[in-house]
Image (cartoon, helix red, strand yellow):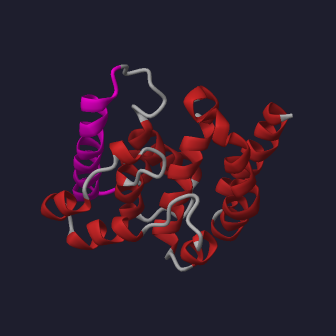
Amino acid sequence: MRGRGIDRGTRDLVELALRVAMAPRIDLLPDDHHPAYLHPARSALVLLHDVRTLEPAALTIAALHESQDDRLRVDPHQLGELLDPAIAGLLERLPLPGHEALEERLVTLDHGPATAVLAERLDHLRHLHLRPELGDTWREVHSEVVRVWAPFADRIDERLAVRFGHWSRTFARRLS
């Protein structure tokens, strides 16, 4: 974060967000090699490495957002006590994969939260092949990415769009 010019206050906030996001993982995942274990930090790293116009609050949002595993989500009310209540409220309203109005909810996001949800979703996708317990959903997930997430990434960030396109093509080969 220092290398990207992120100020000390924001770095402290992101570190707090990572500690909060890791708590259920430490408690509930028996193996620290589980693909979801390091997900919060990897989501923030996607933003740091790939997004040119980075809004610092997006790092906190990406670290705390959990779109795949309900049991690993942090209670937004707990977040309101630890973080800015505005971030907690935003997290509660972020669209999740499979939502019936996913496209509409994504396009209403401001740039920072949009990059955060894209980075968070991309990290889950990059590790989907390591989650055999989700294998019966792979075709549906791929279809949603091609139909919704990749076009949304095209509108938001060039590098994230490239990453979603690459994942879509690569995962299509896995499905055939």
Work out whether 59 lies above or below 3. below
Q: Is residue 97 magenta?
A: no
* Location of residue 129 in the rendering, given as x and y in whole percent from the top left corner: 64, 30
Magenta part of the chain: 6-30
Question: Foreground: 134 or 19?
Answer: 134
Image quarter of residue 107: bottom right
* Location of residue 135 in the rendering, given as x and y in whole percent from the top left corner: 64, 33
Work out whether 110 lies above or below 64. below
At horizontal 42% and vertical 54% (from top left) the residue drawn is: 62
Question: Foreground: 28 or 32?
Answer: 28
Q: Residue furthest front?
A: 136
111 sits to left or right of 135:
left
Q: Is residue 163 visible?
A: no
* Location of residue 24 in the rendering, given as x and y in whole percent from the top left corner: 27, 38
Q: Residue furthest left?
A: 81
Number of numbered markers: 0
* Location of residue 121 in the rendering, given as x and y in whole percent from the top left corner: 55, 51
The secondary structure that dominates the magenta segment is helix
Image quarter of residue 174: top right
At horizontal 58% and vertical 35% (from top left) the residue drawn is: 134
At horizontal 31% and vertical 34% (from top left) the residue drawn is: 25
12 sits to left or right of 135:
left
56 sits to left or right of 20:
right
